[in-house]
């Protein structure tokens, strides 16, 4: 009996092309779009030597100290600037207007700069010029206080910049915030599996469809029939989640960290959570299929939004200001579980997420059970 | 007794859908449950099937109390719902096979039964079709095949012919009679009195959740005070002749209007001959003349004062 | 005008699903407006500040001095000193730099020792580099004093360094930059408009088409005494009125939210550009409507066709952040040309033909897409008619 219902349900679910689209194809497409749109965002954040110009003038030629420093930071692999020398101010203006340089330096009585925007790169240019200015000021202060300092090698010290910092990595993984979009996408897909659960309930509750009434009058235990169908849905859901996960990992090269086994288990647990959420919503909410679908969509889309699928920072903002919400949102629990696996070296937060996810799955399942356990209906 | 319903009460809030309903269905009967829309036919069926909770009463099937877990009873029941209850995602064959599989585990046996059911409803050319591609009549036939493939001893049909073309309807009715000949007890609900008259051996008429009459169709018709109804087209009929007609023995009433004379007979009386003789002797010329026996509609009309089909 | 009226009724029936897009759009637009009014210091060079977390095991004058100087380039974010909290903050860029000064650092520093400051950063990031510069600058100058003025007191050292840091490089802002930043809101608004407009237009127009492509209904319409021409005119008129209504509402909302925008020619050019896009998207919706057979299929296609181009054409992520291949693919969608035109318009300070010509070219491409969509739709329609 189990295999008879199981196989038939498999056919029923797989032939629902619309559901297959929303639960598998749509997430894959979104993944591709994300990947195309975000592939450069990390590069954008990465520091690269940027183009600037210096306006040619007598003062610039005479100021060898400045010229040497400027040239030294525009050379080699660790350089800050790609330096061009502009013939005159007009030429530099033109370069700036055409976005060929971020800004240009003018050397006159004072060293100044001209830029178009107030971005980070423009500020780095300013920080560099400021540092030259500050150093010059400190040298004159020192000489004023103790002219003998020059003889003791003050100018040599100027050239020997020392790095007083040492990098202390906080995690073995890179803090790549783009990843969160893909984790949230995977979590959303798990919740979309709820559509399968929704369909299973519609086809087993006699007050929801005549098909189900027919199954109810057959000599089959209702919960057994439901469980067979639910297993079919779970198989499809798990297969889809794994396909998506494989696509993200190997097709789009999304980094899920090193704990691959846990990632797979988490994804499967997420699939079960989504499935039971859909079943629960379908059993709980009275009204037509349209309303059930709308509620499931609203829950999963709001959940995904709050987990940072549309705007990454939201997840952090919620976590900072309304932490309770991030623990109640199953999409966030899953997203955060993937994030913890990738980013943390400890398992504490992961365990917390999975525990809460387990609790909510249990609530969904138990709720569904108590609603569909009833075999007679008040009205059909 | 195959079905025994005793004092069944079902309320929807303030609305009493079934009001102390009692009836019995004997083995081998084609039992008709007749009543206008909303009279409680489907509610009664759903209660019998243990799909609906009811407030009071007992239901026994095959002599045992019916419950949602009475699987040995359920195994012998075939149900054809009012709404087509099939899976859009499964083909004709797969649908019948699925529902049959809920009753019959043995695969070889099932295959044979499914083939028989497909033959029975004449869907052989459509076995690979999806329900969406079937016309209304064919869909109804599929609906029936899904209910009877497992050869149940009791078949319940809830308005199986609603919105079906006459050709398919006849096919369905013939099929029901055939199933009955093969030994199945049939419970048939409808608001089409012609169908019920045609196939049912015993009939219960429902109105507002109550049994208002029951018996064979002859018994039912004999319950009412009227007999034969004679209608004649006359060019003219003087008032005194009409009065003479009314006074004839066995005539319950006679009316003339719009050039139509309607003579209703008393119960058990046949007046066609005497009316013809009267017209001849009075030299009244007539066009068409015909006589009808009372229908179940007349029965319903007389008992409730309203038409079966409103 | 029975056909026209029917179309309007169909639209009204589908209004709720369209309203979702509009409401979300307006919500985001309002968010952007409130956010952008806060930082309205256009016309002046502003010191960009990065967010950092600062932990210190000691509170010496040197550390205080460093912190004071850093406050010119950094915002200090208060964070609990817990690994996971710090990790979260770094991952989500709540801070881009965590400084940790060990106990005894000052003493070692003053004595020429080798103690270092711990830093945790987003590797290779621009903002980390920026903060690095500031930290290194302060400490290197301080070291200069320590090395060259023997026995300098810590207080004097901090004082002198502060003095050195008190002057700034003068910065000039190029003239054109001012309008560019003024147009920030409009660019955001009009770029994002592409997403909402396409979703709403596809949903609306395809819904009308779906009803009229129903074969039985088509036959019934043909049998009516209305001429096919009049019917088509009403039908096209209804679609046109719908598209224009959408456009007017969306563009109107822009001026309600940001009335100053009305006075800038840049915005008016963007309005024109959005009108061109509306025409183009109407054509696309018409094509989709004539290809689709069910409402479910429409919502699937609608999602893919609106989200896809918006992601790759620079609606959600600005074009300058997209890589070259993606942009090449995107150039096969009208959305790309629309966004490109908007970005160009935002940078304009004069409006001569010569300056505008690349923008006009983009608009022509959009119109080309519109023509192509219509041509395909008509060809499809003709084929359909022959088949049935």
Image (tube, rainbow, N blue to C red):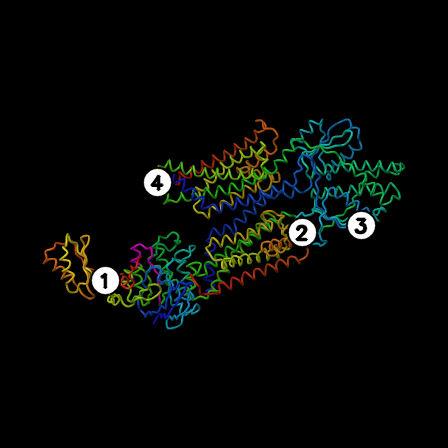
Residue B15 falls in image quadrant: bottom left
What residue would you read off at disc 1? B294
Q: Over which residues does the magenta segment extend?
A: B154-171
Which of pointers 2 and 1 indicates the residue nearer the eye?
Answer: 1
Q: Give the vertical position of A134 relative to A87 (above or below).
A: below
How far apart, in angstroms, are the residues tagged by discs 4 and 2? 65 Å
Q: Are marks 1 and 4 on the same chain?
A: no
Inspect this view and state whether residue B127 appears.
yes
Give yes or no for contact between labels 2 and 1 (Cβ–Cβ under 8 Å).
no
Vertical relation: C176 (above or below) C310: above
For mark 4, name the chain: C
Q: Secondary structure at mark 3?
A: loop
Residue lying furthest right: A148
Circle 3 sits on which residue? C59
CA distance separating discs 3 and 1? 111 Å
Q: Residue at x 33, y 40 (%)?
A: C224
| Horizontal relation, residue B44 to residue C262: left or right | left
Identify residue for label 4.
Answer: C222
- Label 2 or label 3, whichever lies nearer to me, is 3
Residue C58 place in picture, x, y as percent? 80, 51
Q: Is residue B106 visible?
A: no
Is residue B161 inside the magenta stretch? Answer: yes
User: Is the residue B188 above or below the residue A107 in the image?
Assistant: below
Q: Secondary structure at mark 1?
A: loop
Q: In this view of the protein, which residue sits in the foreground, A240 or A277?
A: A277
- Disc 3 to disc 4: CB gap under 8 Å: no
**Image disc number at residue C88:** 2
């Amino acid at each position: 009996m189990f295999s008879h219902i199981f196989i038939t349900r498999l056919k029923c679910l797989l032939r629902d092309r619309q559901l297959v689209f929303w639960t598998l194809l749509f997430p894959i497409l979104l993944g591709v779009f994300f990947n195309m749109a975000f592939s450069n965002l990390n590069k954008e954040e990465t520091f690269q030597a940027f183009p600037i110009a210096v306006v040619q003038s007598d003062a610039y030629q005479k100021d060898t100290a400045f010229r040497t420093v400027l040239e030294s930071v525009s050379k080699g692999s660790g350089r800050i600037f790609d330096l061009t020398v502009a013939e005159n101010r007009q030429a530099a203006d033109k370069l700036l207007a055409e976005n060929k340089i971020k800004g240009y330096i003018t050397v006159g009585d004072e060293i100044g700069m001209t830029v178009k925007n107030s971005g980070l790169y423009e500020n780095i240019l300013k920080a560099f010029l400021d540092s030259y200015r500050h150093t010059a000021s400190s040298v004159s202060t020192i000489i004023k206080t103790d002219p003998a300092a020059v003889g003791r090698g003050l100018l040599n010290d100027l050239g020997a910049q020392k790095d007083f910092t040492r990098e202390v990595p906080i995690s073995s993984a890179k803090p790549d915030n783009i990843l969160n979009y893909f984790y949230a996408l995977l979590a959303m897909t798990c919740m979309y599996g709820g559509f399968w659960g929704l369909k299973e309930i519609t086809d087993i509750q006699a007050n929801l469809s005549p098909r189900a009434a027919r199954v109810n009058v057959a000599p089959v235990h209702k919960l057994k029939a439901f469980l067979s169908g639910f297993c079919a849905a779970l198989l499809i859901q798990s297969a889809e989640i794994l396909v998506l996960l494989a696509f993200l990992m190997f097709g789009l090269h999304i980094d899920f960290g090193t704990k691959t086994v846990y990632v797979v288990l988490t994804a499967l647990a997420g699939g079960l959570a989504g499935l039971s959420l859909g079943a629960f919503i379908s059993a709980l909410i009275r009204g037509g299929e349209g309303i059930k679908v709308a509620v499931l969509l609203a829950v999963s889309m709001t959940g995904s939004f709050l987990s940072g699928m549309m705007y990454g920072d939201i997840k952090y903002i919620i976590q900072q200001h309304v932490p309770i919400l991030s623990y109640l949102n199953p999409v966030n629990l899953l997203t955060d579980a993937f994030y913890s696996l990738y980013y943390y070296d400890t398992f504490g937060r992961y365990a917390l997420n999975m525990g809460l996810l387990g609790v909510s799955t249990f609530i969904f399942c138990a709720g569904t059970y108590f609603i569909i356990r009833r075999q007679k209906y008040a009205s059909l | 007794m195959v079905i025994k319903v005793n004092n069944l009460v079902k309320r929807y809030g303030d609305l009493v859908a079934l009001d102390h309903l009692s009836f019995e269905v004997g083995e081998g009967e084609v039992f008709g449950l007749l009543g206008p829309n909303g009279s409680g036919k489907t509610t009664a069926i759903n209660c019998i099937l243990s799909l609906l909770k009811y407030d009071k009463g007992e239901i026994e099937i095959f002599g045992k109390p019916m419950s949602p877990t009475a699987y040995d009873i359920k195994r012998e029941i075939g149900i054809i719902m009012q709404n087509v209850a099939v899976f859009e995602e499964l083909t004709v064959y797969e649908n019948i096979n699925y529902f049959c599989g809920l009753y019959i585990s043995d695969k070889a046996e099932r295959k044979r039964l499914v083939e028989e059911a497909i033959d029975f409803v004449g869907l052989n050319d459509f076995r690979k079709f999806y329900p969406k591609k079937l016309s209304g009549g064919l869909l109804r036939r599929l609906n029936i095949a899904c209910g009877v493939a497992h050869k149940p001893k009791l078949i319940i049909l809830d308005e199986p012919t609603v919105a079906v073309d006459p050709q398919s309807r006849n096919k369905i009715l013939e099929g029901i009679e055939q199933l009955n000949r093969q030994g199945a007890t049939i419970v048939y609900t409808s608001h089409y009195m012609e169908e019920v008259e045609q196939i049912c051996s015993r009939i219960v008429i429902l109105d507002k959740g109550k049994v208002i009459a029951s018996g064979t169709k002859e018994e039912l018709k004999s319950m009412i005070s009227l007999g034969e109804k004679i209608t004649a087209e006359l060019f003219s009929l003087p008032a005194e002749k009409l009065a003479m007609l009314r006074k004839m023995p066995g005539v319950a009433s006679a009316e003339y209007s719009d050039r139509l004379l309607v003579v209703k007979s008393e119960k058990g009386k046949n007046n066609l001959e005497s009316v013809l003789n009267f017209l001849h002797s009075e030299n009244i010329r007539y066009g068409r003349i015909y006589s009808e026996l009372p229908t179940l509609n007349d029965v319903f009309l007389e008992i409730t004062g309203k038409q079966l089909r409103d | 005008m029975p056909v026209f009226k029917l179309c309007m009724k169909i639209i009204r029936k589908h209004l709720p699903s369209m309203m979702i897009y509009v409401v979300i759009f307006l919500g985001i637009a309002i968010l952007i407006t409130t956010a952008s009014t806060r930082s309205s210091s256009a016309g002046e060079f502003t010191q960009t500040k990065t967010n950092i977390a600062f932990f210190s095991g000691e509170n010496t004058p040197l550390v205080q001095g460093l912190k004071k100087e850093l406050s010119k380039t950094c915002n200090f974010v208060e964070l609990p000193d817990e690994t996971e909290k710090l990790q979260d903050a770094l991952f989500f860029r709540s801070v881009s730099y965590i400084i940790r000064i060990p106990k005894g650092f000052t003493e070692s520093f003053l004595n020429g020792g080798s103690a270092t400051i711990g830093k945790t950063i987003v590797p290779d990031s621009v903002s980390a580099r920026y903060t690095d510069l500031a930290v290194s600058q302060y400490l290197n100058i301080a070291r200069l004093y320590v090395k060259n003025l023997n026995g300098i007191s810590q207080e004097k050292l901090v004082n002198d360094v502060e003095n050195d840091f008190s002057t700034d490089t003068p910065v000039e802002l190029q003239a054109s930059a001012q309008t560019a930043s003024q147009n920030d809101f409009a660019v955001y608004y009009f770029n994002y408009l592409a997403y909402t407009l396409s979703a709403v237009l596809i949903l609306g127009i395809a819904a009308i088409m779906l009803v009229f492509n129903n074969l039985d209904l088509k036959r019934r319409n043909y049998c009516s005494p209305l001429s096919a021409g009049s019917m088509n005119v009403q039908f096209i008129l209804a679609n046109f009125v719908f598209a224009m209504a959408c456009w007017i509402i969306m563009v109107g909302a822009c001026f309600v939210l940001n009335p100053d925008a009305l006075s800038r020619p840049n915005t008016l050019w963007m309005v024109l550009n959005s009108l061109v896009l509306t025409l183009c998207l109407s054509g696309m919706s018409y094509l989709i409507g004539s290809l689709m057979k069910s409402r479910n299929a429409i919502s699937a296609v609608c999602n893919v066709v609106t989200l896809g181009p918006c992601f790759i054409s620079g609606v959600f992520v600005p074009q300058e952040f997209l890589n070259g291949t993606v942009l090449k693919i995107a150039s096969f969608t009208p959305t790309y040309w629309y966004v490109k035109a908007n970005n160009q318009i935002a940078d304009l300070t004069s409006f001569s033909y010569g300056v505008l010509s690349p923008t006009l070219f983009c608009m022509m491409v959009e119109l080309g897409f519109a023509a192509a969509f219509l041509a395909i739709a008509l060809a499809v329609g003709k084929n359909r008619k022959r088949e049935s």
